[in-house]
Image: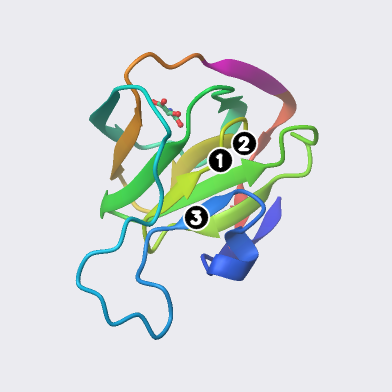
Amino acid sequence: MRQLESVTSEAFAPFGTVLEFPVKCREDFVIVDTEEKGGWRVAVFRYQNKEIRRIENHPFSKESFEPLEGITVLLVAGHDTPEEYRAFVLDKPICLKKGIWHQVLTLTPEASVKITENREVESVFYEYDTAKSVMI
Ligand SMILES: NC(=O)N[C@@H](O)C(=O)O
């Protein structure tokens, strides 16, 4: 079980980018993250699970998670340390780096996110010995 953390650009930096305007930015349009090449797709994903047993990563694709409904907790871990996961309340949109372990659970009956990722996305899975949840 892990303590919940807030999504801030500092706390989330090892795992990816917070999709927000940079501090003191006066522009109306800012590209906050991008891919060098390749097509992408947009998906919606909904879930009811309060714990997870399996975490995944996409070695060749970044992936955005943008909260739509409910309260989502995003579990993330560095590529070489899947057991050392952290748990963020997803109250703002983020974009994961390639290869970051991740999975979602919800604190509400159901939650959903918008996902953007490469059109062709490979997934790798890691099974935990015990179910993982969060302290609130
Ligand atoms: N469950 C989950 O995080 N899925 C995503 O990574 C996805 O690619 O759909």
Q: Residue at x 43, y 36 (%)?
A: 63
Q: Which residue is mark 1?
A: 97
> How many marks are shown on the rendered structure?
3
Question: What's under tag 2, amino acid-wise?
Answer: Ile
Between the C-alphas of marks 2 and 3, the distance is 12 Å
Determine if the magenta segment contains residue 5.
Answer: no
Classify mark 3: helix, strand or loop.
strand
Query: Which quarter of the rendered picture does the C terminus lie within?
Result: bottom right
Circle 2 packing at 10 Å, graded few (<14), some (14-19), many (20+), is: many
Q: Which residue is mark 2?
A: 100
Classify mark 2: helix, strand or loop.
loop
Which of the labelled discs sits on residue 129, or is there none?
Answer: none
Image location of residue 46, percent across then percent down: 29, 35
Which of the labelled discs sits on residue 17, or is there none?
Answer: 3
Determine if the magenta segment contains residue 126.
Answer: yes
Looking at the rendering, the stretch of residues picked out in magenta corresponds to: 123-127
Classify mark 1: helix, strand or loop.
loop
Q: Nearer the viewer, residue 6 or 37?
A: 37
The reply to whether residue 69 is visible in this rendering is no
Whether label 1 touches label 2, CB < 8 Å: yes
- Dividing the picture into quadrants, the one containing residue 12 is bottom right
Q: Residue at x 58, y 25 (%)?
A: 56
Q: Residue at x 58, y 26 (%)?
A: 57
Q: Residue at x 54, y 24 (%)?
A: 58
Q: Nearer the viewer, residue 80 or 1?
A: 80
